Amino acid sequence: MTLIKHELRQGWKSLAIWTLSIGFFIVICVMMYPEMEGEMEEVSEMFSSMGAFTAAFGMDKLNFGTLIGFYAIECGNILGIGGAFFAAILGITALAKEEKERTAEFLLSHPVSRNKVITEKLIAVFLQIVIMNVLVYLMSIASIAGIGEEISWEELGLLHLAYFLVQIVLAGICFGISAFIRGNGIGAGIGLATVMYFINIVANITESAKDLKYLTPFGFAEGADIITNVDLEWKMVAINMVFAFIAVGMAYWKYAKKDIR
Amino acid sequence: MIFGSRYIYEKGNRMAAIKIKNLTKSYGKARGIIDINLTVEDGEFFGFIGPNGAGKSTTIRTLLGMIQVTSGEARVLGYDIQKESTKLLSEIGYLPSEAVFYSGMKVKDVLKLSADLHKKDCAEERKRLCERLQLDVNRKVDELSFGNRKKVAIVCALQHNPRLLILDEPTSGLDPLMQKEFFDILRERNEKGVTIFLSSHILSEVQTHCKRAAIIREGRLIACDSVEELAKTNAKRVSIVGEVSIDALEGVRDKKTEQDSISFLYSGDVNTLIQHISKADIKDLSITEPDLEEIFMHYYEAEDK
């Protein structure tokens, strides 16, 4: 528990900044909806006739004229990318920061086993992601209620659940990498999240590459699919969760015998 | 026997606080430590001497389980360093050569965190130590000077009343008054039975405080004995003022020549020396015991030959 508390205390500023930034943009986005609503039909038409670009963002399947359709694309991208970066940074710095900032010697000269360090750090990462998502979800609901739109609870809940799961997968994979590196992994973390995001876009555009969707958590967090099916592709979720579990397992394996400098 | 069960350790009259057997750590091409054998008895004030980069910190970090052993084994307070490092760490206090803490934390929070990680309430001892070392606990660690950070590390190492203290270059950054206070605290702890393992390149420190010491050089232990014995060599420091040539003399080392004086370590026959210099015109002569610094050089040079 000591380490979890310590991690949360160390990370709260960063958590607050990310939560407020993502929440702020989502609220702004939602607030823009009433103004755009009237023009949405034209926008929808325009968006659905942009060929590959339309497919890339799933805009061929969505109705921009409804709030949830608008929300899935606009706010979905903010939470999707912002949340992914946040989770990747949390994961990749979790273990590596101790060596980079040279606090590992302080930490590991105390009677805490390496396994305990990993477990408590993992829980702290998980809790921070949960806190960010719950707060952003609340801000989102409040803003939708604020503009007087009806809340499609199921769709909204599924969208947020999907992005939460994307973050869990990315954080897990980055956590695994964190055990192997000593330096600042933030660049690598953001890079990985970005690559994952673009793999999904490539899979959306290119018919022959559509199975690539299974290799990125963004594959199951496609706003258009979620709103259309009112469900997640659980197979994709499961496959990506397996990646995350393997990465976390590797972290335990590697960190147990790592030479700390 | 020592490497038997922990039970035997506790039954024995004198338990070894540290027992290292053929310990080797290699880092690929870079040198680590090679085949170290060393025993520190319970309650000892032990010195571990060597210049920077000789392997002192590597030895210590291996004992603490921070780096993996390549071969050999070691027990600290009877615990296997590889299998029981958590138990071991709960009973020792470690002072790193360069103390780094979590940025943004206040001194008191760092000290509390350290106590919490030990699962001990160390409030009283912490207060006592902070007062003695004049440490302001309300400052942020980032604002502290090197010496003050060292004080924080000292409190972290001592507040949970460990049975063994492992100190890596403990006095660097501390002013002389604080050094004195620090060594007073160490002496008090040692008198209460705490074993102290002091790693240092400052020989006078070891000579003043330690009873026994080991010398490490390029990853190998080259000597281990009582400080008295280590300092006891047949070499003498000879200083002569006057016109004298010692080129023909054997057993001369560390020769320092100035305008009309010469100083050297002499390990040959004293009679030969007297006969040799009796022919010269000497204004002043002194023959003294070398200090540990010189002995240290002697060990280092002896290895080179």
Image (spheres, grey):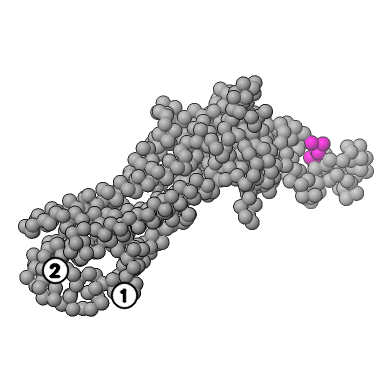
Give coordinates of residue A241: x percent, y percent.
Answer: 35, 54
| Residue B235 inside the magenta-drawn segment | yes
Displayed quadrant of residue A38: bottom left
- Number of marks in picture: 2
As helix, strand or loop, the secondary structure at mark 1 comes to loop
Taking depth in this image into account, of B20 and A123 the one nearest to the observer is A123
Q: Residues within 10 Å of mark 1 (few under 14, many from 20)?
A: some
Displayed quadrant of residue B226: top right
Residue B249's tag is none
Lower position in the chain sequence, tag 2 or tag 1: 2
User: In the rendered image, is residue A18 in sight?
Assistant: no
Marks 2 and 1 share the same chain: yes
Taking depth in this image into account, of A106 and A178 the one nearest to the observer is A178
Taking depth in this image into account, of B280 and B143 the one nearest to the observer is B143
The magenta-colored residue range is: B233-238
Q: Amino acid at mark 1?
A: Thr
Looking at the image, which residue is at 68% across and 48% down? B218
Q: Amino acid at mark 2?
A: Asn
Q: Does residue B23 appear to the left or right of B99 in the view shown?
A: right
As helix, strand or loop, the secondary structure at mark 2 comes to loop
Say which quadrant the N terminus of chain B sits in.
top right
Residue A206's tag is 1
Give coordinates of residue B62: x percent, y percent.
Answer: 58, 42
A1 up-or-down from A222: above or below = above
Circles 2 and 1, Cβ within 8 Å, touching? The answer is no
Looking at the image, which residue is at 62% across and 55% down? B28
Q: Hey, which residue is sitting farthest front in the picture?
A: A235
| Residue B6 inside the magenta-drawn segment | no
Residue A63's tag is 2
User: In the rendered image, is residue B24 in sight?
Assistant: yes
